[in-house]
Amino acid sequence: MLLYIGSTIFVIFNAINEPEARVWNGLFWVIQLFICINAVAKSFLQENRGRMLYFYSVASPASFVLAKLLFNSLLMLAMSLLCLLLYSMFLGNPMQKMWQFIGLVLLGGWSLSLVFTFLAAIAAKAQQNAAIMAVLGFPIIIPQLLLLVRLSNAAFAPLVYIPVGTVLLLVALDLLVVLLAVILFPYLWKD
């Protein structure tokens, strides 16, 4: 994962050097999306049938999926902060409101990890097919990603404020994904 983050940022640095703020922001979120897909997809897809049977015997479906959601959230938060650090070092830092952007990066990393963890659980039950995760994931994640890009654009303008209602909408979407995972995962778990 670290090699993927570093090499992607280095290639962008060599191609663009110091992009303008809107391009910087858009590329950052695209990188976040693909980091999340690479990091979180492995959470369920690398589990073999024997290990899943063991987990089935020692844990309830709700606690298992919540543990996976928590682990992947923490992993994505760390990757998001590392990506932001490297991205700022190589491509400059055009942010006007750095702390608000860092908060959005953490919220966005959490959002992406929740969605793709749940989709990885679904894809794992479809004969370990990661392509299903991409097919299911992109239509679901595009509105959330556009919302994150729109929110984070405010961190690059000194007089534009991040609307609290939109941030709360993003948090509500995250809580909805957690609720859906807890409700629906037991049906996947039985198989």
Image (tube, rainbow, N blue to C red):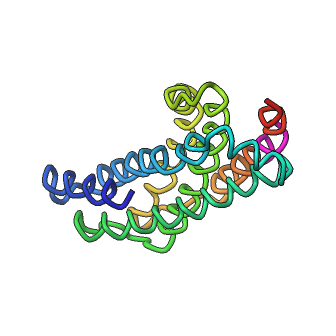
Question: What residue lies at 65% left-to-right and 60% top-to-bottom?
Answer: 164
Nearest the eye: 12 or 147: 12
Q: Is residue 169 left or right of residue 30?
A: right
Q: Is residue 26 toward the left or the right of residue 52 in the image?
A: left
Is the stretch drawn in magenta largely helix, strand or loop? helix
Assess whether residue 183 is covered by the magenta stretch: yes
Say above or below: 13 vs 121: below
Nearest to the observer: residue 176 or residue 55: 55
Query: Looking at the rendering, which quadrant does residue 95 occupy?
Result: bottom left
What's drawn in magenta, residue-wise?
179-184
Image position of 99 (left or right of 177): left
Image position, residue 165 (x, y; %) = 68, 55
Please report the residue visible at 61 percent of the width from the left and 31 percent of the height from the top: 123
Residue 36: x and y in percent read 49, 49
| In magenta stretch: residue 3 | no
Image quarter of the C terminus: top right
The image quarter in which residue 190 lies: top right
Q: Is residue 139 above or below residue 80?
A: above
Q: Quadrant of the N terminus?
A: bottom left
Dividing the picture into quadrants, the one containing residue 5 is: bottom left
Residue 45, percent across and down?
A: 57, 39
Q: Residue at x 72, y 44 (%)?
A: 177
190 is higher (above) or lower (below) than 6: above
Q: Is residue 184 left or right of residue 166?
A: right
